[in-house]
Image (spheres, rainbow, N blue to C red):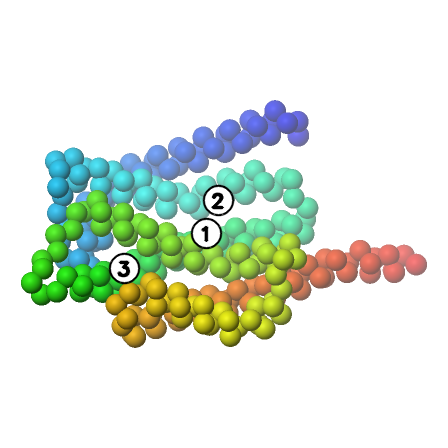
């Protein structure tokens, strides 16, 4: 395909993706009030400090809904644009990674809200003491939830990152298995940092999913390593057969 036709296909993919986000953003606005009330549950009640703050918060929330709901479609359009330039073995490997990356991202968002937000909010509010009443702005709270959920979603990409680095020869499953002791220490330090109250139960709730993700990363890395080795050996086997 000529270069200008590639640009035209890219333009169409971008416009359709933006249209999908816009449509689902409108859809999200319809349910934004109920979702905002649902998100505020961990802190009981939030306040808005200016007349436009509640509207702006609902609007931001609608955009977030639009992006999250349209993410599978946007990934599909991105895949449709990239796939013609890939070799057959690259397609067979990249497609599952794209699907898994999308699924893991959404799971990370859910984990961030359902697991991390209640724990960390409880710990942080506890620093105020019984004589101090928290009055949390709804926009500040939503920003806090967004950052935490985004961090969890990025963390859930660990298996995909390990698979990609393995494919490019930067990482190997053997390296991940040999360094598991260091990984556990780093994970526990990370859990302690993300749970500033020092509560052991909170740290365990934080650490266990990360340990599971590390184990999944080793499995993914091993699969990609074996697939890459099989692909590399296939041409040699074909040449031996010709001889």
Can residue 164 be seen in the rendering of this structure? yes
**Percent position of residue 50, x then y:** 13, 38
**Percent position of residue 106, x then y:** 39, 54
Q: Which residue is mark 2?
A: 75
- Quadrant in the picture for residue 166: bottom right
Q: Which residue is mark 3?
A: 117
Q: Name the element at disc 1.
A: helix
- Quadrant in the picture for residue 190: bottom left
Q: Nearer the viewer, mark 3 or mark 1?
A: 3
Q: Which residue is mark 1?
A: 102
- Quadrant in the picture for residue 212: bottom left
Say if 41 sits above or below 70 in the image.
below
As drawn, the label of residue 35 is: none
Tell me how far mark 1 sits from mark 2, CA to CA. Answer: 8 Å
**Percent position of residue 176, x then y:** 57, 68
Can residue 35 be seen in the rendering of this structure? no
Farthest top residue? 4
| Front residue (pair 64, 53) | 53
Nearer the N terminus, badge 3 or badge 1? 1
């Amino acid at each position: 395909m000529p270069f200008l036709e590639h640009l035209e296909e890219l333009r169409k993919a971008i416009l359709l993706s933006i249209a999908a986000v816009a449509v689902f953003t409108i859809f999200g606005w319809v349910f934004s009030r109920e979702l905002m009330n649902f998100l505020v549950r961990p802190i009981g009640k939030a306040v808005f400090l200016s007349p436009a703050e509640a509207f702006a918060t609902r609007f931001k929330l609608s955009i977030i809904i639009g992006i999250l709901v349209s993410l599978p479609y946007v990934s599909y359009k991105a895949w449709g644009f990239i796939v013609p330039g890939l070799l057959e073995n690259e397609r067979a490997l990249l497609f599952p990674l794209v699907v898994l990356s999308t699924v893991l991202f959404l799971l990370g968002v859910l984990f961030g809200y359902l697991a991390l937000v209640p724990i960390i909010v409880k710990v942080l509010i506890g620093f105020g003491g019984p004589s101090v009443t928290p009055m949390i702005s709804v926009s500040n709270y939503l920003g806090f939830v967004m950052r935490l959920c985004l961090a969890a979603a990025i963390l859930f990409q660990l298996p995909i990152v390990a698979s990609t680095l393995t494919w490019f020869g930067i990482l190997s499953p053997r390296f991940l298995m040999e360094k598991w002791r260091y990984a556990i220490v780093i994970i526990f330090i990370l859990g302690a940092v993300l749970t500033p109250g020092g509560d052991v139960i909170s740290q365990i709730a934080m650490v266990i999913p990360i340990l599971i993700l590390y184990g999944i990363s080793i499995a993914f890395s091993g699969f990609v390593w074996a697939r890459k080795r099989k692909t590399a050996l296939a041409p040699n086997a074909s040449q031996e057969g010709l001889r």
